[in-house]
Image (cartoon, helix red, strand yellow):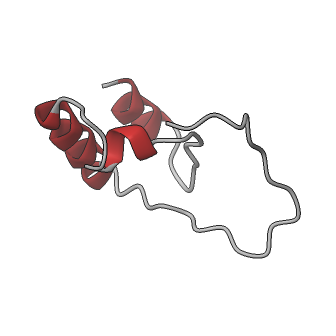
Amino acid sequence: QELRDIRDECPGLWMLCGDFNLICRGDFNLNHRMMGRFRRVLNDLALKEVYLSGRRYTWSNEQSP
C-alpha cells in the first residue's frame, strides 16, 4: 500500500531501487503466494526492470546465495 500511496502523491517518473531477485525469481525456495503478490504489485504499479549494460563498477560480498 505504501508504494501505491507514493505513486499517487508523486506523479511522473520515479524509481524503486533494490535487489528483488530473491522475491521475483522462482529459482529460490520461497513462499510462492507471496512471490505472486509481489509480482502483481509490480505490474499494478507499472514498474519495469532497468537492465544495466556497460557499467563500470560492480559489487560482490563473495557469498553464494
Left or right of 43? Residue 21 is right
Residue 40: x and y in percent read 20, 47
Residue 12 against residue 60 in the figure, above or below: below
Residue 33: x and y in percent read 11, 34
Residue 65: x and y in percent read 49, 36
Q: Residue furthest right?
A: 56
**Residue situated in front as seen by the camera: 23 or 61:** 61
Q: Residue furthest top?
A: 2
- Residue occupying the point 57% across, 39% down: 18
The quarter of the displayed image where residue 2 is located: top left
- Residue occupying the point 66% across, 67% down: 52
The quarter of the displayed image where residue 51 is located: bottom right
- Residue occupying the point 17% across, 29% down: 31
Left or right of 11? Residue 61 is right
Total of numbered circles in the picture? 0
Where does the N terminus fall, quadrant-wise? top left
Residue 27: x and y in percent read 30, 49
**Residue situated in front as seen by the camera: 29 or 53:** 29
Residue 48 against residue 20 in the figure, above or below: below
Left or right of 63? Residue 19 is left
